[in-house]
Image (cartoon, helix red, strand yellow):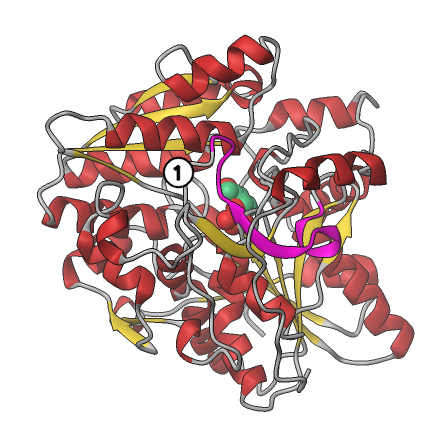
Amino acid sequence: MPTKIFLDEKDIPRQWYNLAADLPTPLQPPLGPDGNPITPDMLAPVFPMNLIEQEVSQERWIDIPEEILEILYRWRPSPLYRAKALEKALDTPARIYYKNEGVSPPGSHKPNTAVAQAWYNKQFGIKRLTTETGAGQWGSALSFACALIGLECKVFMVRISFDQKPFRRLMMETWGGHCIPSPSEETNAGRAILEKMPDTPGSLGIAISEAIEAAVTDPKGETRYALGSVLNHVMLHQTIIGLEAKKQLEKANEKKVDVVIGCAGGGSNFAGLSFPFVADKINGADIKIIPVEPTSCPTLTRAPFCYDHGDTAKMTPLLPMHSLGHDFVPPAIHAGGLRYHGMAPLVSQAAVEGLLEPMALHQIECYEAALLWAKTEGFISAPETSHAIAATIREAKQAKEEGKEKVIIMNWSGHGLMDLTGYQAFLEGRLHDYPLPDEELAKSLKGIEGLPKPSEAKSGKW
Ligand SMILES: *Cc1c(COP(=O)(O)O)cnc(C)c1O
């Protein structure tokens, strides 16, 4: 019984899986400011056309270009681990597997799409990418990808993380990226927020507004914007995780998976592992698929499915998604990558369909889980990843109560070696849980009143 299951480079998946092709109720289109569906050319100032084509594609399988695979081989296929030490500590009959996405150079799953996005932009003749970053994982992933592919990279980093996580900024700069705190004085969107809320910790929504503005106002038209999560093409690029995992589970002689778990901020690492299993579920398999989010930012568990903007300044089209409202500024929990008001439309539609069983957890339970993980499996987890670990522990304990040999697979989305200030706060007893009060949610949802409503139709099968 091996601890790690490897795949040879020659067995790496050569196509991404597109869930849009298989959703029982089709994805609804993004809408422009006039309430009409937007056309691909309306997105052209923001993204290169080759990525826009992926964004709207209904093809089930999309080839991964050889040059992208050449870069992914630096850390892919990533190992699948059997969490034997955790199983033993929990005395559970469950077999727990995790995909280790922390082995990439920046330390998370994010380079899977950063490399693909940088490559498609380069092909299209773009010289520079702008982006936002929360915890700094995405900014460092894109800086890394731009360095290897030969693009300039400018990153607007959420203020609170910029202050709490100086080492992520230094990683970006090491790879040649340029990182500034958001809100900044560099954009109209940033200046407007600073005037109203000079002490704001910032949010991903604000940083996205700034990064898009910085891209579309390049007079030479050589700059585009890259988003690290939420969009369909990002979910697509991440599916390599789940596709590899399926081959690895087969090597481990596992015939059936019972539970699939990933933490969910914008939804990309969760989608990456789970979508190939969602496809099995659509085709009749009995699998419990759990996206895990913080109680302080409970997008799938408490927010409505609605049309909303992806950013605070309302520069993005309206996306059909679960959203806490584009004005939502979540409490400053340490899992910066889970502090986003929306959720990927593909994940949201799968949730509406009943294919997913979302869970919200408090940060203290998650840090306790991360400590148990560190003392058993050994790895120090990103605070985001700790949400998936806590849910995995709950499921493993439930398997014990039920006396069932369940197979649980979890996405270990990244390491936490740059996030030790969060661990410090936990170890010193300075962390608090932040249940979101109903009044605050209601206030934030005022921002979406009057916007068009998506259909909540579903097949009714799940
Ligand atoms: C960014 C990040 C997340 C959250 O983003 P998703 O798009 O929801 O995956 C989770 N884990 C890690 C380690 C991250 O860096």
Residue at position x 78%, y 34% from top?
440
Q: Image check: 152 left or right of 253?
A: left
Q: Image check: 294 left or right of 156?
A: right
Farthest residue to the bottom: give it.
284
Residue at position x 76%, y 44% from top?
295
Q: Quadrant of the N terminus?
A: bottom right
* Residue 123: image location, x then y, percent: 11, 50
Magenta stretch: give its range.
298-313
Residue at position x 77%, y 48% from top?
361
From the viewer's perspective, is residue 237 above or below residue 286? Answer: above
Front one among 250 and 243: 243
From the viewer's perspective, is residue 288 above or below residue 420? Answer: below
Residue at position x 53%, y 78% from top?
25
Is residue 80 visible to us here?
no
Give the residue at mark 1.
106
Element type where label 1 sits in the image? loop
* Residue 195: image location, x then y, percent: 53, 9
